[in-house]
Image: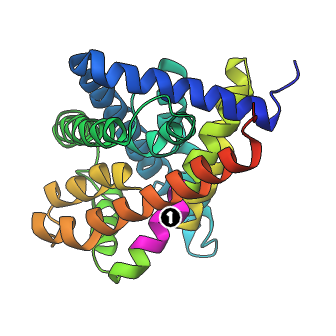
């Protein structure tokens, strides 16, 4: 089956954005449940990336890129679930609501309301999954995963503000390009492949995704990482969120709409 053309993808994104805007104003409860599920899905990808990526310590010494490759290969299951099952992900919505807004199908206030509610729902879903399905299950209680998740959490709050912001731009540029690619296909394979390639790239490159970090940092804190909640917010969540908005809304949503929106 032939995939959609760039103008057709942009129109599909606009239609998806319009539907998300309508859900935001018509059923906040459904929006929040879908957002909680998305936070859990992304966290599922996060723990899988830790288990597979850090599970072969004897192979890592002479192969420094192997951990990144394995983590990158595992993590995209989260976005695949979000896209195929219709969950609400803050970072994906950063791009999807822009074509419909440019087409005057809803207001900027609706965008801000959607982003705020979905961000909160993603956080709740990520924290619940991290506590009950990771920490309470003991998935990171033993080494090498115990030491790995602590190291990851501490590294994510040790970078300069600007570095995290720029890495946030890179992460959601890739994630929203993955959503655009997924929109181009009809079959499960096409959508999964579209999600997998760019997301694998951002994980392997070490970019910063605010929703993924709602798993990585709390999981590290629960295992004893030297990271405070305030440090998580100021050193990572704020700059990565700003960067994710820029990467999704501007570099994907706005630019692709400008390039490919059909003019009447």
Residue 110 image point, x, y percent: 33, 35
Horizontally, residue 42 falls left or right of residue 229, namely: right
Comparing 55 with 131, the one in front is 131
Comparing 192 with 4, the one in front is 4
**Which residue is denoted by mark 1 in the rendering?**
169
The question of residue 168 being in magenta is answered with yes
Q: Residue at x 41, y 72 (%)?
A: 165
Comparing 15 with 155, the one in front is 15
Q: Which residues are magenta?
A: 165-172
Quarter of the image holding residue 155? Answer: bottom left
Number of disc labels = 1
Quarter of the image holding residue 187? Answer: top right
Horizontally, residue 93 falls left or right of residue 134, namely: right
Q: Residue at x 62, y 63 (%)?
A: 66
Residue 243 image point, x, y percent: 43, 64
- Assign the N terminus to one quadrant of the image: top right
Comparing 131 with 112, the one in front is 112
């Amino acid at each position: 089956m032939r995939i959609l053309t760039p103008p057709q993808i942009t129109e599909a994104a606009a239609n998806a954005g319009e539907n998300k805007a309508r859900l935001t104003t018509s059923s906040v409860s459904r929006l929040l449940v879908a957002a909680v599920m998305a936070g859990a899905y992304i966290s599922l990808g996060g723990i899988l990336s830790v288990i597979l990526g850090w599970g072969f310590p004897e192979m890592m010494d002479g192969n420094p890129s192997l951990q990144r490759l394995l983590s990158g290969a595992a993590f995209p299951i989260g976005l695949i679930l979000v896209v195929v099952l219709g969950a609400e992900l803050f970072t994906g919505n950063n791009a999807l609501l822009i074509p419909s807004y440019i087409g005057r199908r809803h207001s900027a206030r609706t965008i801000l309301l959607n982003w705020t509610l979905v961000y909160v729902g993603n956080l709740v879903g990520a924290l619940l999954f991290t506590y009950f399905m990771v920490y309470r299950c003991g998935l990171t209680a033993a080494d090498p995963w115990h030491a790995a998740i602590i190291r990851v959490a501490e590294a994510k709050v040790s970078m300069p503000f600007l570095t995290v912001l720029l890495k946030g731009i890179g992460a959601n540029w890739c994630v929203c390009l993955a959503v655009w690619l997924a929109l181009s296909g009809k079959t499960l394979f096409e959508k999964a492949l579209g999600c997998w390639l760019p997301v694998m790239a951002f994980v392997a490159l070490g970019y910063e995704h605010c929703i993924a970090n709602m798993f990585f940092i709390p999981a590290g804190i629960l295992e004893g990482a030297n990271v405070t909640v305030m440090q998580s917010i100021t050193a990572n969540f704020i700059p990565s969120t700003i960067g994710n908005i820029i990467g999704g809304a501007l570099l994907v949503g706005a630019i692709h709409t400008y390039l490919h929106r059909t003019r009447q």
